[in-house]
Structures are given as C-alpha cells and as structure tokens.
Amino acid sequence: MAVTTGGAAHAAATAGQPAGAHVSGTGWATQQGPAYAYAQSDARSKCASYQVVQRVSEDIHMEGSGWRVNLVLVCG
C-alpha cells in the first residue's frame, strides 16, 4: 500500500516558520479591505510567533466579483 504525504507534509513544512522566514498569504473577498486582512491572517498563521515584520510583495487584483490578494511577508 502506498503512503501519501501531500497535504499533511506541506502543512507541516509551512507551519511555525521562524523569524526571518518568508511566508505567503492569500485572501479573497468582495471588498479589498477584508481580502487584504484575510491574506495577512493566512500569512501570520504560518509564522511561529504569529507576527510579521515586513511586507516583501503584494498582488491585489479583481477576480470574479471580488478581490484577490496575494502577500509575501517576513515572520517576526
């Protein structure tokens, strides 16, 4: 029987990143503000301290009937 590790291995590899690590976050909402907040929350959830200290990049664009936000942040 084959053992698959796809989702669980990826989650373990991206959770609890140390200070200085770059993490990505994605959010979508019908308004730009909430979409940005969701993306920030997604990225923070991947940092061991839940803090971010710097924004590396952001991509904000219309997608369907709302906004898609993709961020890359640095854990604090």
Image: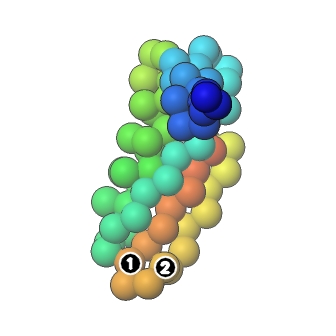
Colour scheme employed for the rendering of this structure? rainbow
For the residue pair 64 and 73, the one nearer the viewer reads as: 64
Q: Quadrant of the C terminus?
A: top right
Disc number for residue 57: none
Q: Is residue 68 left or right of residue 72?
A: left
Whether residue 10 is visible to the viewer of this picture, yes or no, is no
Task: Give the crowd class for mark 2: few <14, some 14-19, many >=20 residues within 10 Å.
Answer: few
Q: Residue at x 50, y 61 (%)?
A: 69
Quickly name the residue at label 2.
Answer: 63
Vertical side of 16 occupied by 73: above or below: below
Quickly name the residue at label 1.
Answer: 66
Q: Position of residue 3 (x, y in %)?
A: 61, 28
Q: Is residue 62 left or right of residue 29?
A: right
Q: Residue at x 61, y 16 (%)?
A: 19
Q: Position of residue 74 (x, y in %)?
A: 62, 31
Mark 2: amino acid: Glu
Write down the quadrant of residue 36 in the picture: bottom left
Secondary structure at badge 1 equals strand
